[in-house]
Image (cartoon, rainbow, N blue to C red):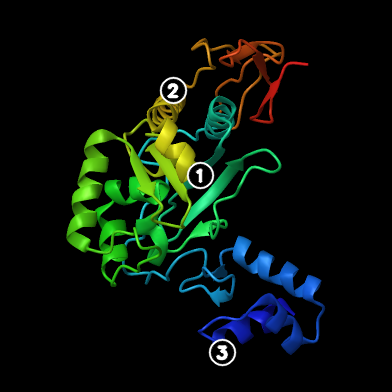
Amino acid sequence: MVLRALRLLGDHPEGLSAAEIGERLGKSPATARYMVNTLCEAGFARRDDSGRCLLGTAPPWGAWVPAEEPAAPGDLGPGDPAPGAVLAEAVTELYRRTRQRAYLVRRTGTLVASVSDVRGHQGLARLPGLDTHVPPERAHGLAFTKVLLAASPTYREAVTAEPLAALTPDTVTCPVRLGAELDDVARQGWARDREEYVRGFGTLAAPIASPSGTWTVALGLSCSSRRLDGHADDLLTDVVDVAREAARQWGSGADHHGTACSCAECGPDEAGGVVAPRNRAVGTTRAGRGHRRRTGRGLSAPRR
């Protein structure tokens, strides 16, 4: 049934609503909405500003690369160790500090950026139109992908090869202006979008540099434009600080206190390093509340 829905979308480049898909497939509106959500979350389709579902321009694993051409590198540079739980903990920490929806976005050698982790409490507004992947034709509108574009000439060239779409009236569609902005992002180490991806929202992001210095992982947040305008400095400080600390931990292979341990209580993590003991407090909020790290889950939970 999902394959039939994909075929329908391919036959209707202008897009279809969930109700229209359900009507054509003989399914209930609820079933049609479920299929649309599944396709969008998997990166095969996307929603436009009106909520209609359109077939994606590339599969979520990216464009096919002929065997005789070298494949683009993955999100680890030469000699980089696996980050283990560091990246997941960075997303949790950014959400804990800001109470805004936090994201981890990665490039893995394709032209489609993957939203690999999201944190946010129930009721916190989601960034409209952002599913689990960012296709190249929308990459110029988000701070997360601007960070990745700034670090990869190949990615930048692929995105700017086609005319840049005006996702909102504030989207930068001039390749020269976008290039200058990406050069600034590379110098300053962070990016921002002001209602460039969707009206009423903005995003902030910074790279989590791997030990080899590559920028293939972006950490950031989304929030309302009003909040971003009123608290931009504080939010940016949190984004940059958490990203830098995550890069430090990734490079050192140490826990939050920078202390390596190989005892039975800590045990090895995914990268063959260590994680903090189960009962060690690893952070405090601005109100002074401690957070504990749970071995093996990569999450920080409030102390009860």
Residue 100 against residue 111 in the figure, above or below: above
Residue 31 against residue 157 in the figure, above or below: below
Q: Earlier in the sequence, mark 2 or mark 1?
A: 1
State which quadrant residue 175 falls in: bottom left
Cα–Cα gap, marks 2 and 1: 26 Å
Label ID, residue 11: 3
Q: Position of residue 45 (x, y in %)?
A: 56, 71
How many C-alpha atoms fall within 10 Å of the one at disc 1: few (<14), some, or many (≥20)?
some
Task: Give the number of marks.
Answer: 3
Amino acid type for the residue under numbered disc 3? Asp
Report helix, strand or loop for mark 3. helix
Residue at 41% x, 53% y is: 195
Quadrant (top left, top right, bottom left, bottom right) of the C terminus: top right
Q: Earlier in the sequence, mark 2 or mark 3?
A: 3
Q: Position of residue 181 (x, y in %)?
A: 23, 48
Q: Position of residue 76 (x, y in %)?
A: 41, 42
**Mark 2 sits on what residue?**
245
Residue at 75% x, 80% y is: 1
Q: Is residue 289 left or right of residue 57?
A: right
The answer to whether mark 2 and mark 3 are in CB contact below 8 A is no
Residue 265 in view in this figure: yes
Amino acid type for the residue under numbered disc 1? Ser
Looking at the picture, tell me which residue is in the foreground, 269 or 157: 157
How many C-alpha atoms fall within 10 Å of the one at disc 3: few (<14), some, or many (≥20)?
few
Cα–Cα gap, marks 3 and 1: 36 Å
Residue 132 against residue 1 in the figure, above or below: above
Residue at 59% x, 82% y is: 9
Label ID, residue 224: 1
